[in-house]
């Protein structure tokens, strides 16, 4: 199994090109189920989750031609409506095919995704909304079985909690439903915004894009032609590398970014002492020599993203003072704490609140990745630790970071992928 070996450095410098957003790519690939034409998608990240979803679509009978950062997906040959456990268990975002398959074919079976390291990850809100749209849903032997033989009907849906993939699933289900669907308390993440924009450009009338109230005029089962589009830059990958600049007190530049999607992250890094210069699609971090402590509360977009919580915890271990990090979205998203503690970090937990006393020099150690963003926190810590850090189980990292070691090597990091 692969592991990453990283030697602490004094500083890094140079430029990193940001890849397309994993969490935008996944719903956009699922969306091709609604198309009658071959859909051309550009700027896809070369990460495991994308390959997994394309494999799922191929297993259902679609054709997926994936080269470099481009894919051509044709789902006109799709002849299966069952997403099996063997694939879904490796990537819970497979649930994103439920809405499109059900609204197009009138029936769908998707394996329950099960939880993951960061939490139980229920899908009750997805299912409740589909039932409101007329679907008959049962859970049989670990599978969601959904039926809507006469198609789904538009209606008003109020989400009890803001759910990113729940919003995406229902937007796609509504796209081919009969009549209008209104989603209240919709997610406003940039990844959901792009899905709405692409659908809007393909003949689906969606109002309220980017707001908490979306209305979607369904096409009553009529498939659409989806024009070629390019996936938005990955704001979490970008935020992670900005933290690499901050933690090593190095000036680095990121290209192919959308700084409008990074507002809360940039604001927090400014609070910790960094300043920034940016152009249309680049940003340079000018880090301070003293990292100030910070208070972080994770919430839905446009507030501070939970997917940046672990990275900021690694950064907070180097602050001059005590930081408070509160995780409000997931019940178990502190798996990186014990690994950071093994490197000498002074962190204490009280429920969903972590208190991080900075100033401790970290020391290299053997540590274990537990989930995608926890892995990136360990990489950041390893950059400033004394000596060598070996990060094991980096298949977690490979799910969401495109060519991480190549990108970090290009800015002067002593990093290599080895096999144990
Ligand atoms: C998406 O997950 C992202 N994944 C996650 O990124 C991200 O952390 C999360 O949104 C929050 O921003 C993808 O987009 C593929 P939610 P999702 O539904 O949609 C509860 C990463 O690192 N909830 O917005 O699964 C849920 O338990 C990943 O890239 C229900 O209770 O998250 C959580 O507490 C990790 N019932 C909250 O809502 C439901 O039916 C937000 O979850 C659905 C969700």
Image (spheres, rainbow, N blue to C red):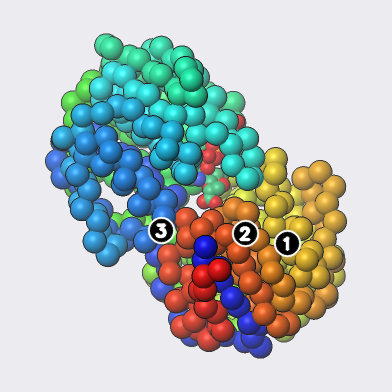
The disc at residue 369 is: 2
Q: Which residue is mark 3?
A: 47
Q: Is residue 80 above or below residue 348?
A: above
Q: The residue tagged with tag 3: helix, strand or loop?
A: loop
Assess disc 2: are there few (<14), some (14-19) or many (≥20) residues with their C-alpha within 10 Å of its C-alpha.
many
- Marks 2 and 3, Cα distance to the nearest angstrom? 17 Å
User: Who is closer to the viewer here, 242 or 59?
Assistant: 59
**SS class of the residue under badge 1?**
helix
Count numbered badges in the picture: 3
- Spot occupied by residue 420 in the image (x, y as percentages of width and height): 55, 68
Q: Is residue 384 left or right of residue 300?
A: right
Asked if residue 3 lies left or right of residue 280, the reply is: right
Q: Residue furthest front?
A: 420
Residue at x 41% of width, y 58% of height: 47
Badge 3 density bin: few <14, some 14–19, many ≥20, Cα 10 Å:
some
Mark 2–mark 1 contact, CB under 8 Å? yes
State if disc 3 and disc 2 touch (CB < 8 Å): no
Q: Residues within 10 Å of mark 1 (few under 14, many from 20)?
A: many
**Going from the N terminus, do you reach mark 2 or mark 3 first?**
3
The residue at which mark 1 appears reads as 339
x, y percentage for residue 387?
A: 70, 83
Report the Cα–Cα distance between label 1 and label 3.
Answer: 24 Å
Q: Earlier in the sequence, mark 2 or mark 1?
A: 1
What's the residue at 44%, 76% (across, down)? 406
Q: Quadrant of residue 149?
A: top left
Above or below, 38 relative to 341: above
Query: In front here: 253 or 360?
Result: 360
């Amino acid at each position: 199994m692969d592991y990453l070996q990283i030697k602490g450095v004094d500083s890094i410098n140079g430029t990193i090109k940001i890849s397309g957003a994993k969490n935008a790519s996944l719903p956009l690939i699922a969306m091709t189920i609604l198309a009658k034409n071959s859909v051309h998608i550009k700027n896809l990240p070369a990460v495991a989750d994308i390959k997994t979803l394309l494999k799922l679509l191929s297993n259902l009978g679609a054709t997926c031609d994936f080269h470099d950062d481009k894919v051509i997906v044709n789902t006109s040959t799709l002849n299966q409506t069952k997403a099996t456990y063997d694939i879904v268990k490796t990537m819970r975002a497979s649930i994103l095919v439920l809405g499109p398959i059900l609204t197009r074919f009138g029936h769908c079976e998707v394996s329950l995704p099960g939880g993951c390291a960061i939490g139980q990850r229920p899908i009750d809100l997805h299912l409740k909304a589909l039932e409101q749209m007329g679907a008959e849903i049962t859970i049989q032997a670990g599978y969601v079985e959904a039926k809507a033989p006469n198609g789904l009907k538009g209606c008003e849906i109020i989400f009890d909690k803001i759910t990113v993939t729940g919003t995406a699933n229902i937007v796609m289900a509504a796209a081919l439903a009969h009549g209008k669907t209104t989603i209240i308390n919709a997610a406003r993440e940039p990844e959901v915004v792009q899905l709405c924009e692409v659908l809007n450009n393909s003949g689906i009338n969606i109002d309220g894009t980017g707001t908490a109230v979306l209305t979607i005029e369904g096409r009553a089962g009529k498939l659409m032609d989806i024009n070629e589009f390019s996936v938005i830059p990955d704001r979490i990958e970008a935020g992670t590398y900005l933290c690499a600049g901050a933690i090593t007190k190095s000036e680095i530049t990121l290209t192919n970014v959308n700084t409008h999607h990074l507002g809360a992250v940039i604001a927090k890094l400014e609070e910790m002492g960094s300043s920034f210069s940016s152009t249309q699609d680049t940003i340079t971090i000018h880090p301070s020599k003293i990292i100030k402590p910070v208070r972080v509360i994770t919430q839905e977009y446009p507030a501070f993203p939970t997917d940046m919580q672990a990275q900021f915890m690694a950064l907070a271990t180097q602050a001059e003072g005590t930081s408070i990090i509160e995780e409000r979205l997931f019940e178990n998203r502190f798996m990186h704490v014990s690994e950071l503690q093994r490197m000498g970090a002074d962190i204490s937990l009280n429920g969903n609140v972590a208190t991080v006393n900075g100033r401790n020099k970290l020391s290299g150690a053997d540590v274990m990745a537990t989930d995608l963003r926890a892995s990136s926190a360990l990489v950041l810590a390893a950059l400033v630790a004394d000596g060598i850090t070996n990060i094991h189980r980096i298949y977690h990292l490979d799910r969401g970071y495109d060519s991480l070691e190549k990108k970090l090597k290009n800015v002067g990091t002593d990093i290599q992928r080895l096999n144990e």
